[in-house]
Amino acid sequence: MSWNTLTVLISRSQGVGTPMYGEGNYSREQAHTEMLTLLERLAAENPALNDALTIWRRGAQDDTVYVPAPDGMMIFALYEHPDDEDPVHAALAWLDDFSKAATGQPAQIVPPTAPGGTFSS
């Protein structure tokens, strides 16, 4: 199995999540470093993310950090996907599992268009 990064902006008012994901096929250590680099960059631009960066550096439980946002929340996570397969399928499954655990409903997701997106490192 390979690892990848996943960042999700969940809009409470719109009732949807917008995922942004990495290139995939990372080792766990590489994915962790990619997320650390991303969080460092984002925290430099937005000090409200300093707590998320601190949590990540200390070792986030289940490789996931949840951050309140003005209209919902942001999630920064690592997830596994099958080697040499498109990591999007596993990301969408992760999001669906998260949504069902949190709300009892399947995820309502704005489909990702390409690796990376707004928060890509």
Image (cartoon, grey):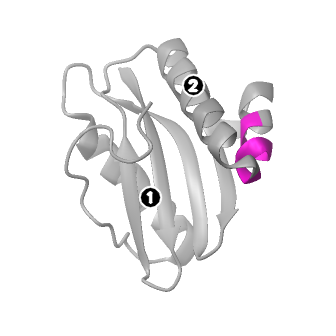
Q: Residue furthest front?
A: 45
Q: Secondary structure at mark 2?
A: helix
| Residue 108 occupies quadrant | bottom left
| Left or right of residue 106, residue 70 in this image | right
Q: Secondary structure at mark 1?
A: helix
Residue 12 location (% of width, % of height): 53, 80
Q: Is residue 97 above or below residue 85?
A: below
| Residue 107 occupies quadrant | bottom left
Residue, x 20% and y 20% (percent of image)?
A: 84
Q: Which residues are magenta?
A: 48-53
Residue 66 location (% of width, % of height): 66, 54
Q: CA distance from mark 1 to mark 2?
A: 26 Å
What's the residue type where badge 1 is placed?
Answer: Asp
Q: Residue furthest bottom?
A: 13
Question: Residue beneath label 2, please?
Answer: 37
Which quadrant is the N terminus positioned in? top left
Label 2 neighbour load within 10 Å: few <14, some 14-19, many 20+: some
Task: State the mark number for residue 26.
Answer: none
Judged by depth in the image, the label closer to the viewer, 1 or 2, is 2
What's the residue type where badge 2 is placed?
Answer: Thr
Residue, x 33% and y 45% (percent of image)?
A: 117
Residue 65 location (% of width, % of height): 66, 46
Comes first in the chain, label 1 or label 2: 2
